[in-house]
């Protein structure tokens, strides 16, 4: 899907989620399995529940029916971003400082485009990352893709889960 349409959908959807305390993390519109899918990844301070997904599905579904920005038929899917969530906004890189991440840039930074290391935060619109023991500064505007990258063994650690247990 083209960037203009993604930007349009994002600008329509994000404002209806914010009053609910829900963050739009990622938005995809893809043809897969013989059908079009509009997939939203959401998050909140206390994690994402099934009730949150249902609420967003109802609200976004009603908005899409009203505004009708997508010509073809599609399926709406809403879910949490998962442990290896996408990093998009500048605040994401500060929020997840100390976490392992993988970043791909649109142009070379320090002679490379792919980085795997530990996020250290943001400074002056640059993502600070420790890669192979070295500090790397990556301009936010050069980010092509970025996501947390926890090893599989981390997914089931009790202390890695959110909220009271």
Image (cartoon, rainbow, N blue to C red):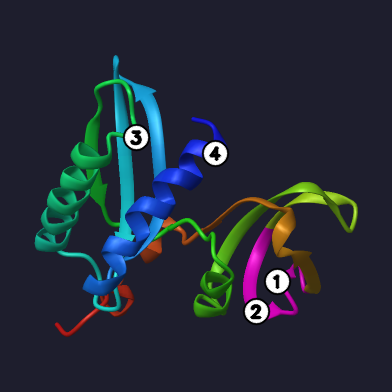
Inter-mark Cα distance, 3 to 1: 38 Å
- Which residue is under mark 3? 69
Q: Is residue 111 found left or right of 27 in the rendered image?
A: right
- Which residue is under mark 4? 4
Determine the secondary structure under disc 1: strand
Residue at left offset 48%, top offset 56%: 86
Counting residues from the N terminus, which is met first, the one under dot 4 or under dot 3? Answer: 4
Q: Which span of residues is magenta-colored?
A: 116-133
Q: Position of residue 10 (x, y in %)?
A: 42, 51
* Mark 4 vs mark 1: in front: 4
Q: Is residue 72 above or below residue 12?
A: above
Counting residues from the N terminus, which is met first, the one under dot 4 or under dot 2? Answer: 4
Tag of residue 129: 1
Q: Is residue 153 found left or right of 90 in the rendered image?
A: left
Inter-mark Cα distance, 4 to 2: 31 Å
Determine the secondary structure under disc 2: strand
Counting residues from the N terminus, which is met first, the one under dot 2 or under dot 1? Answer: 2
Residue 117 in sight here = yes
Q: Position of residue 152 (x, y in %)?
A: 40, 56
Q: Position of residue 71 (x, y in %)?
A: 32, 23
Tag of residue 120: 2
Q: Position of residue 72 (x, y in %)?
A: 30, 20
**Going by the picture, which residue comes out furthest to the bottom?**
164
Q: Are marks 2 and 1 in contact (CB under 8 Å)?
A: yes
Residue at left offset 50%, top offset 46%: 7
In-front residue for pair 149/88: 88
Residue 89 lies within the magenta run: no
Inter-mark Cα distance, 4 to 3: 12 Å
Counting residues from the N terminus, which is met first, the one under dot 4 or under dot 1? Answer: 4
In-front residue for pair 109/98: 109
């Amino acid at each position: 899907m083209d960037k203009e349409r993604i930007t349009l959908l994002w600008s329509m959807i994000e404002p209806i989620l914010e009053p609910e305390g829900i963050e739009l993390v990622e938005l995809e519109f893809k043809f897969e399995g013989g059908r079009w899918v509009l997939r939203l990844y959401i998050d909140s301070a206390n994690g994402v529940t099934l009730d949150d997904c249902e609420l967003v599905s109802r609200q976004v579904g009603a908005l899409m029916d009203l505004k009708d920005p997508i010509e073809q038929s599609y399926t709406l899917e809403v879910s949490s971003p998962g442990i290896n969530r996408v990093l998009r906004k500048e605040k994401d890189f500060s929020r997840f400082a100390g976490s392992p991440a993988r970043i791909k840039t649109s142009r070379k930074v320090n002679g490379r485009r792919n980085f795997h290391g530990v996020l250290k935060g943001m400074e002056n619109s640059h993502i600070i990352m420790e890669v192979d023991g070295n500090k790397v500064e990556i301009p936010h505007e050069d980010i092509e893709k970025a996501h947390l990258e926890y090893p599989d063994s981390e997914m089931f650690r009790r202390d890695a889960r959110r909220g009271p247990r």
